[in-house]
Amino acid sequence: MKTGKDNWSLKDKVAIVTGGGRGIGQSIAETLSSEGAWVVVADIDEGNARAVARAINESGQQAMAVRCDVRDESQVQFLVQQAVDWGGGVDILINNAAIMRRGFVWSLPSKDFEELIQVNLIGPFYCIKQCAPRMKERGGGVIINISSIHAFGTMEEMSAYATAKTGLIGLTRACAIDLGPWNIRVLAICPGAVDAPMLHGDRPQEQIEVIRSQWARAAPLGCIVTPQEIAQLVAFLCTDKAPSMTGAALLIDAGVAAHLRVRDL
Ligand SMILES: NC(=O)c1ccc[n+]([C@@H]2O[C@H](COP(=O)([O-])OP(=O)(O)OC[C@H]3O[C@@H](n4cnc5c(N)ncnc54)[C@H](O)[C@@H]3O)[C@@H](O)[C@H]2O)c1
């Protein structure tokens, strides 16, 4: 139970959350701010980013919204500069922004594949590249890349998404090596199905329920993951309670990936 500011585990850390305008990113922004971090809510959807930052400010915590398309390195540069001007530096980066493009590999438009790689893989590279020197100035930092269970096993029509999320684990490992000497830890979190917009897509409610129950049936724990659980894990990894964790890819999937669903012989 928190009794005051001194108990906040991320007190006065400056955190950038990309794709913080809704879904999992919103939960991460809210949770980091509730732990005392100053949060920059970055999103291509400025209206959503503003709404999330406003709600955080109204609850008495610190947040700022910045419109940023992570596909554009100059916009990422501007984002990081805004964070430095506002909070004095950058301590935490959460690479959460992503899109979904589905289609069988023989028919997926090449521009869809390229766009997804731009947002889900090259965007995180730009963000890491721009943030790391700022973290070095502060004596260290934490970078968390939101990957996916699709980096471990995937399904039909997922060539672009699975490629990007698997690449993000490679980027995590390589950056953990490059940035370890600067005391910057780099981790990937790999959620299974999360009750959040990317899982829902544009589907009608009854179809969403079917998808939820299919994923839950595939999980040894019989449930799907909540955005709040992802956010709690992110917050823990950002604290000094995880000082030697770096370079790892952590599954959080109710056990789905552990279970090879092949009938016993
Ligand atoms: N929902 C799931 O089941 C699930 C499972 C595993 C992993 N993930 C990952 O978790 C993260 C969040 O998922 P979500 O369900 O909350 O998705 P979401 O679609 O609700 O959120 C993505 C956010 O990113 C923003 N965004 C999209 N393109 C952008 C760009 N070019 N620049 C900046 N911002 C951009 C969107 O505006 C949105 O606010 C993603 O990385 C996703 O791949 C989600």
Image (cartoon, helix red, strand yellow):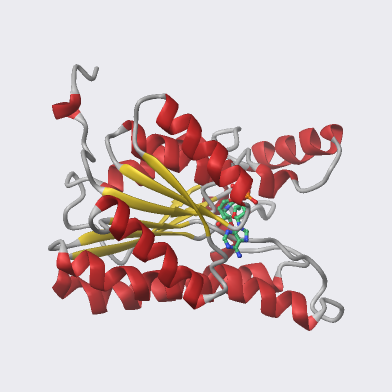
Residue 216 lies, with reference to residue 15, above or below; the image says above
Q: Residue at x 68, y 37 (%)?
A: 217
The quarter of the picture where the C terminus appears is: bottom right
Q: Residue at x 16, y 71 (%)?
A: 182
Residue 123 lies, with reference to residue 253, above or below; the image says below
Q: Residue at x 34, y 31 (%)?
A: 61
Q: Residue at x 60, y 33 (%)?
A: 223
Q: Nearer the viewer, residue 230 or 183?
A: 183
Q: Nearer the viewer, residue 70 or 158?
A: 70
Q: Position of residue 90 (x, y in %)?
A: 27, 58
Q: Position of residue 95 (x, y in %)?
A: 45, 60
Q: Is residue 192 visible?
A: yes
| Quadrant observed for ligand 1 in the rendered image | bottom right
Q: Where on the picture, by quarter, is residue 154? A: bottom right
Q: Is residue 167 visible?
A: no
The quarter of the picture where the N terminus appears is: top left
Q: Where on the picture, by quarter, is residue 219? A: top right
Q: Position of residue 66 (x, y in %)?
A: 49, 54
Q: Position of residue 19 (x, y in %)?
A: 54, 53
